[in-house]
Image (cartoon, grey):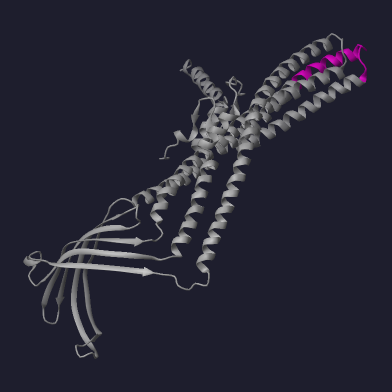
Amino acid sequence: MKTALPLLILFSLTLNLLHAQPQNLDLLKALEMAQKNSPDALVAQTRFKNSYWQYRTYKADFYPMLSFDGTLPELNRSLSRITLPNGQDAFVSRSYIANTSSLSLSQKIGLTGGSVFVNTGLQRIDILTTKEFSYLSTPASIGINQPVFGFNQMRWARRIEPIRYTIAKRQFAQDLEDISLQTINLFFDYLNTQTSLAIALKNKANNDTLFKIAEGRFNLGKIAENDLLQIKLNYLNSDIAVEEARMNMTSTSARLKSFIGMDVKEDIALNLPENMDTNYTVDFAKAWQQAEQNSVRSLDHSRLQLDADKDVAEAITTSRFHGNLFASYGLNKRTDNINDIYKKPEDQEQIRFGVSVPILAWGKARASIETAKAQQMVTLATIKKDKIDFEQEIYIRSMRFNLQKRQLGISHTANVVADRRYFIAKQRYLIGKIDITDLNIAQNERDNAQRAYVDALHTYWQTLFGLRRATLYDFKEGKQLSDVVKLPE
């Protein structure tokens, strides 16, 4: 028992120590978590699902549709006005039960905008006053309903709706890139405060050591009181900087963890994203080619142009002669015996052709056509301008990415040099070769170089994902980002 108690205490302390260890988080892991768990990702997934089911609804319109209609039963006890054989109207008492059922198969024709159908049905009427009943059967009926010289909505839908769905896929990929950009900003906001805290803690420890050394030198009369006070002030300022950095870390950490779906109470430590492949460059010609092929913006240009063309076509067709043809052929049979409902049925034909011819509309038709054409010209001009602006944006983004790669290398070298310079300056100060002013300059330059390097990393990742978002293309892996889009479960 005496041996088990110390082991239990040691095990408890070990668990507490492990629990207190912060979870290391790198940028790629944060990006992955954000695209899966962030509220923005859920909104993007829901929006894409909605577009998917809208597309499925459009596709279903072109499949055969089988439907059943029935009234089982209809009871009617009423007085109704009817016209008698002599031409006079009279109120007659009616009392019957009617049962009807029909089964229909229809198919839309996208090429012509019409539809064909096949149906079968059965009706029965029971006269309650005489207790008589009869049947009316339609074993089979086939027909067509076809607009003539009218506007074919289905033809345009077959051209536009697949583009809309492709845009939705690309928009979902672009939304994920927006989430990545937001994650990058939050990640580096926290990383900046984490870096500031590390700098402040290091400066506090250095200034504490320097202050103790300076006190000894001052007591020996080797430095002036002004130098001692400067070192003490540096120590106090570093202490304040530590508290401010801790406060800033609390808020930036909470924002990052909340966005990527982590528990706000969980302690994390960010890894500096230095191990990355920067050996590739982005050629503008390739970037523009990928932007034209993959981006939401380029495909939306096609959709806008098709919408404008459709409006012009609709204005023209609705302003001129058009009609509608309905034709059907079938068999039917009336009988009082259910066993005879399909014996020797009679022919049943219907043909109806309706026309609509505008005669006098006071220029309304022409005005509608000219309005649609004017809007078409505005759309084409807007597309042309936006395409020029988009091309310029891709050029700037690709050039900025290549430039930022070089600036990142320079910032990294400057950070190494500044850190080495401060180390040498500190050693020279300890042996009395330089004064406190030179040491402070070296320290400030080291701190600024470290922060500048973190800022350069931030700008690099912003530039990279900004280019990815604009082109929807991963230049490192050489793949289109919308190709990997799958319907969220």
- Please state, as top left, top right, bottom left or bottom right, where the N terminus lies in the image: top left
Which picture quadrant has residue 469? top right
User: Which of the 4 quarters of the picture holds residue 450?
Assistant: top right
- x, y percent for residue 57: 37, 51
- 162 or 31, which lies in front? 162
How far across and how far down the image is residue 283, in percent? 59, 26
Q: Quadrant of the C terminus?
A: top left
At x 57% / y 28%, what residue is drawn?
27
151 or 180: which is nearer to us? 151
- Position of 2 relative to 128 (above/below): above
Residue closer to the observer: 432 or 337: 337
Q: What is the span of residues highlighted in magenta in the rendered image?
A: 203-225
Identify the residue shown where x is 67% and y is 22%: 406
**Can residue 264 be seen at all in this image of the molecule?**
no
* Main secondary structure of the magenta stretch: helix
Which residue is depicted at the point 32% across and 60% down? 146
Image position of 207 (left or right of 170): right
Which residue is depicted at the point 35% across and 61% down?
A: 147
Q: Is 330 on the left-hand or right-hand side of 8?
A: left
Q: Residue furthest top?
A: 431
Question: For this rendering, which residue is in front, 397 or 32?
Answer: 397
Look at the image and say whether residue 215 sits in the magenta stretch.
yes
Q: Is residue 130 above or below residue 100?
A: below
Rendering coords of residue 185 (x, y %): 63, 34
Specify whether residue 460 is in view: yes
